[in-house]
Image: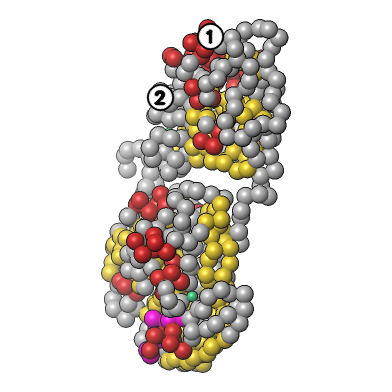
Amino acid sequence: MRGKDFFGAKMANSFWLFTLIVTVGLILSGCQHDLVKTELPPDSTAQEQSQNTDEQSTNNTQAEQPPSTGTQPTSEPRSTQTSGESPAEYTPDVTFTLRTNIAEGKLIFEGVGGSIDGQTNPNLRVATGAVVQVTLINGDGALHDVSFPEFNATSNQIVGQESSTSIVFRADSAGEYFYFCTVPGHRQAGMEGKLIVGEAEASGPSGANIALDPTDLPGPLNRQSSEFVRVDLETIEVEGHLGDGRTFTYWTFNNQVPGPFIRVRVGDTVEVHLKNREDSTMIHSVDFHAVTGPGGGAVLTQTSPGDETVFTFKALNPGLYVYHCATPLVAQHIANGMYGLILVEPEEGLPPVDREFYVMQGEIYTRESLGQQGALGFSVDKLLDETPEYFVFNGAIDALTKTSPLQANVGETVRLFMGVGGPNFTSSFHVIGEIFDRVYDQASLTSPPLTDVQTTLVPPGGATMVEFKLDVPGRYILVDHALSRLERGLVGFLYAEGEDNPDIFHEGGGN
Ligand code: CU
Ligand code: CU
């Protein structure tokens, strides 16, 4: 089947010969893991080989080695030289074919053949030391390439549907690495996958899941009278999952970001217990914007590791309020994850809806620049410069896309409680593909809502409540419409399931 792809291919001129050789090998082998013989340029890096094949084949007589990445000495250099013959030959241990494509609004690599067939941005698993051949086929016609930078392997750029190119490199160091398209913007648009060399899965950091599920919130109180309510918060510092191959030391309320959604009724008396776990390295505290009193409680709750503090307040004003740690540097405690929302329901409660979700936006200031993997450290300089590397919904890059995307049905009205922990950036909150039927601007629940709003501002230390009815099935995308932040991790999905509604939305013309 791979052979068929190649026969139909319109190959880019300068490296057709190389590709042809590979193709013949693939056709003969008929199997991803079979051995394929092809030519190897002598001492060029892998990325040059397909460009230079014609030239190389005339002057590669001194070739003795398969491509080396140059970063690590291999303990057992592969002996690939054929006895006294020229040109030199080598044998890939494993071959993969990737095809560029557009799927669900993203640019992707799609696996072709073998165990990766049909997968989006497949994980490519190889043994340590394996010689890996990757063939890239252009499926969408735009300019693309594929790069494995840790192995100095970047393919030619190919343009035009069915053009193709191949690269070969030795995966000589165990670990997890990204491969991606180097055309500006394409990696961010989705063209990124993982090369897993050796037993890498255990070695890559994973970290605890700190992302709060957006459905993890108490339901409407449905009470007619005020009550006494006890709230227990525990501050916990934890190495958590920030995103693929990346962890970060979060400071949390109750081990999650955002902290728990607290729901009380106006007139309630609220007794807050703040416990700071004994293994904490910091003093922590809590400032509720719903509190009338010094520091919103922060003055009374500066709590050392292992201690507990208590204070009591009366919820005087209905609304949706942020709470956060208020221990210096306050911005640092917030940036590291210490924020949440408290809803003070009006006497009559909120209008009924079918589903409620809890989403908060924050910034992550890492020493390492965007995209680097590993256990990332916090940068106070970047915090003070207000230059975050990541923006996140519910604490992690993939919290609302992979870990817990929002789900609802067509015909339902959904409500989002949305707040910004920040500490610094105002959100231009928007849901791609929907219009907010109602926005409780700045989370004022006693003013009439705005109606029919596309994008609403949510400041740091502020919140909003938005509602909309789902009319058309599909995937809707939560963003801050300052969309560069999407490329730094700020994106969430809302899947609406149900019958098509061609009256409102359909492909093609007509009515
Ligand atoms: Cu591309
Ligand atoms: Cu704190």
User: Any magenta on residue 457?
Assistant: no
| Position of residue 131 in the picture relative to residue 443 (left or right) | right
| Dot 1 or dot 2, earlier in sequence | 1
Q: Which mark is residue 159?
A: 2
The amino acid marked with disc number 2 is Val
Q: Disc 1 versus disc 2: distance between alpha carbons?
A: 29 Å
- Residue 415 appears at what percent x and percent y? 42, 67
The amino acid marked with disc number 1 is Asn
Residue occupying image coordinates x 35% and y 72%: 462
User: Any magenta on residue 290?
Assistant: yes
* Secondary structure mainly formed by the magenta segment: loop
Q: Which residues are magenta?
A: 286-293
The quarter of the displayed image where residue 21 is located: top right
- Residue 97 appears at what percent x and percent y? 57, 28
**Mark 1 surroundings: few (<14), some (14-19) or many (≥20) residues within 10 A:** few
Residue 316 appears in the figure: no
Q: Is residue 305 above or below residue 71?
A: below
Q: Is residue 322 above or below residue 85?
A: below
Q: Is residue 326 above or below residue 272?
A: above
Query: What quarter of the picture does the N terminus occupy?
Result: top right
Element type at mark 2: loop
User: Label 2 CB, ligand 1: below 8 Å?
Assistant: no
Q: Which mark is residue 59?
A: 1
Q: Which mark is residue 220?
A: none
Residue occupying image coordinates x 32% and y 77%: 444
